Amino acid sequence: MPRRRKRDFLIRGFSKLLKEDKLKIVSELMDNQVEAMELMKSFWLSDKSKQKVFDEFSENTLSNFYIPYGVAPNVVVNGRTYHVPVVIEESSVVAAASSSSRFWSERGGFKARVIGVEKIGQVHFLWNGKKSKLVKVLDSLKLYLREAAMDISKNMEERGGGITDFELLDFTKKMDNYYQLKVSFNTVDSMGANFINSCLEEFASALKEFFKTHEIFSDNERECEIIMSILSNYTPNNIVKAWVECDYNDLNGIFNEMTGEQFARKFQMAVKIAETDIYRATTHNKGVFNGVDAVAIATGNDFRAIEAAGHAYATKDGSYKSLTKVFLTENKFRYELTMPMSLGTVGGLTSLHPLAKHSLEMLGNPKAKELMMIVASVGLASNFAAIRSLVTKGIQIGHMKMHLFNILNHVEATKDEKEKAIEHFVTHRVSHGAVKKFIQTLREN
Ligand code: MEV
C-alpha cells in the first residue's frame, strides 16, 4: 500500500534551512521519500564548489534540472560562420534550425543588422501641482537627476553607454495626478537590468528632493508620491533585423515537384495568415522563439524578458501579428524577422554560469550587438524550417521521428529494440501506443 501523503502543510522559514533538510521536507510529498531524495541528490554535481555556484544562482535550491545543451551548426551571419550553442528540450527544434541554417548557408547565409539599442526605465509617481511649472524646470530637473545618478552611471559611460534621455509624461487624464519619468539608457554589452533599476531608484529619491527644495513649487506642491521605479521590458527601439534572400530558382526542389516560385508563393500565404489571425500568429512566433530562447538560455540571458518584449512588439500595429515578413519581387524571395532583443554578453549569468561562458566562447566572445544578430538569425532559421515543413510535407513526420527516440527511452528499449523500431517506423505512423505495442510484441517473441 502506498504511503498516504500529507500535502497541505505550510513550511515556515524554509529558506533558512539547510539544503538536506529542505530536500527531506519536500520529499515527503513523494510516494517514496528515500528514493526521491536519492534521485534529487544524484543530480548534484560531484564537485562541491561547482554545485555551490549553481545553488547560489537561486533560492531554495534542491537539485539541478538538466536540459540538453546542443549545437546548431553552420549558421552563417553576415558572411561569418557560427556553430551556435542551444539549450532546449524539443529535439526537432535543433534539427530544424540546423537544417535551415545549412540550407541558407548555401544561399548567401543570413544577413542581420542592429537597428537600435535603447532600453527603457520608468519612475511612476503621483504629484498634485501645476504642470506648467514642471515643464518650466524640466531642463534643470534633468541635470539634477543626472547628477544624482553620477556615481552609478560613471562606469557605464566609460564603456560608451549611460543615460541617454529623460521624458516627463503626463497621464493625469487617465489616472489622477499620475506622471511618469521615462528614461532611456544604453547599457552597451550588458543586459543592464541592475544598472537601470539602480539608476531609477536614485532618480526616485532625487525627484522627491527636487519637489521639496525647488523654489518654483508652492508649499502644497512639495510632496510627490513614488509608486514604483522599474525598467520596462518593452523595448521597441532595441531592435534587430535578420533576413535571408535568394532567387526563386534557388528554391527549386525544396519539395517534390514544387517549383521555387510555387514554394515562395505558398510560403508567403502561410506568413500572411500569421499576419491576419492571432491563433496562427502566436504559434508562428513560438517557432521564432524556439530558436531565440534556446540561444538566450545557452548564453545565460533572460529569455523571459526577450519573450515579453517580442510578444508586445508583435502587437505594435494594433493587433498581434507575425514577427516575420515575406517580400516577393519578380524573381526574388526575401524573408525577414524584426524583433526587440535585450541581451548581454557581460555581467549576470553570462559570466557566472560556466556553460554560459563556454557558449560565448564558442561564438568567439561576441559583443552584445553581434549576439543579437546571431540570436535573431537562429530565430529566423527555426521559424523558416517550421513554415517550410508546414507548407510542404507537414510537421509531424519530423516531429514524430524525433519523438520516437523519446518514447523508446521511456519504454526502456534496448539498443537492438531501438534499431528494429527505427526501421519499422520509417513506414508506420509513430504514436506512443504504437511504439509501446511494437516493443511489447518484440519482447513476447
Ligand atoms: C513547434 O514547437 C513550433 C511550430 O508549431 C511552429 C509553427 O507552427 O510555425 C512548428
Image (tube, rainbow, N blue to C red):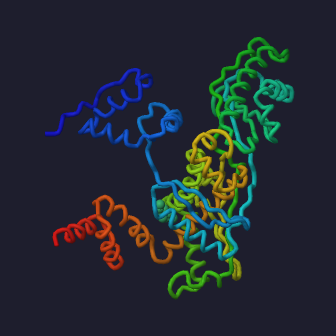
Please state which of residues 179 and 314 is positioned toward the viewer in this rendering.
314
Q: Determine if residue 119 is in view.
A: yes
Q: Determine if residue 172 is in view.
A: no
Question: Residue 415, image x and y in percent?
Answer: 32, 67
Which quadrant of the figure has residue 38?
A: top left
Left or right relative to 216: residue 423: left
Question: Residue 18, image x and y in percent?
Answer: 41, 25
Kindly give the residue lying farthest to the top in the view shown. Answer: 219
Above or below: residue 85 compared with residue 170:
below
Question: Residue 313, image x and y in percent?
Answer: 63, 51
Image quadrant occupied by the N terminus: top left
Above or below: residue 314 compared with residue 252:
above
Left or right relative to 62: residue 165: right
Please state which of residues 419 and 193 is positioned toward the viewer in this rendering.
419
Please state which of residues 193 and 27 is positioned toward the viewer in this rendering.
27
Kindly give the residue lying farthest to the front in the view shown. Answer: 47
Which quadrant of the figure has residue 381?
A: bottom right
Name the residue: 71% across, 53% down.
366
Name the residue: 73% across, 50% down.
367
